Amino acid sequence: MSLATIFNVSGSAISAQSQRLNVVASNLANADTVAGPDGKAYKARMVEFQTQLLGASPEDPAAAGVRVSTIREDDSPGKRLHNPTHPNADADGYVTYSNVDPVNEMVNMISASRSYQNNVEVMNTAKTLLMKTLQMGQ
């Protein structure tokens, strides 16, 4: 594996974790929202990754790493609270909130952030090794 491949793998992982952080931020921003005018509450979104194996892509045989394959909605029901005075209450007096679990999202955010930081460190280490290799030739 060449150093260029290491940069490609780490770069793709950084990009994927960046997308994951954006989805987590969106989920956290909508954690306490209620159903909108269409009657549907915000659904938490989850990022799914896919591995790209070296040489597996015919259009780019040097591509390797990870990519975001899909961003899907969580189908679990939102929490329902009884509050008949709320303007968005249904006929039974229940208000439907989003299905975002803030604790789970914070754990997800910490995990994505650490993965991002680890891949930056991999790139820095590869750069240092490349610089030392070049210095040996002087």
Image: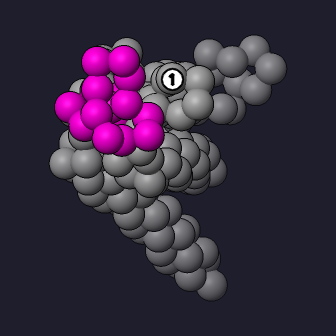
Residue 80 is situated, as x and y percent measured from the top left of the image, at: 25, 28
Question: Looking at the image, which residue is at 21% across and 33% down?
Answer: 81
Q: Does any portion of residue 68 appear in the rendered image?
A: no
Instruction: Characterize the magenta stretch by its predominant secondary structure.
Output: loop
Question: Looking at the image, which residue is at 36% across and 18% down?
Answer: 91
Q: In this image, 111 relative to 16: left or right?
A: left
Q: Amino acid at mark 1?
A: Gly
Residue placed most toward the observer, 61 or 113: 113
Determine the residue located farthest toward the front in the rendered image: 85
The magenta span reads 82-97
Residue 26 is situated, as x and y percent measured from the top left of the image, at: 49, 48
Q: Secondary structure at mark 1?
A: loop
Determine the residue located farthest toward the right in the rendered image: 59
Residue 53 is situated, as x and y percent measured from the top left of the image, at: 53, 23
Question: Is residue 91 highlighted in magenta?
Answer: yes
Question: Looking at the image, which residue is at 63% across and 21% down?
Answer: 55
Q: In this image, 26 relative to 77: left or right?
A: right
Where does label 1 land, which residue? 39
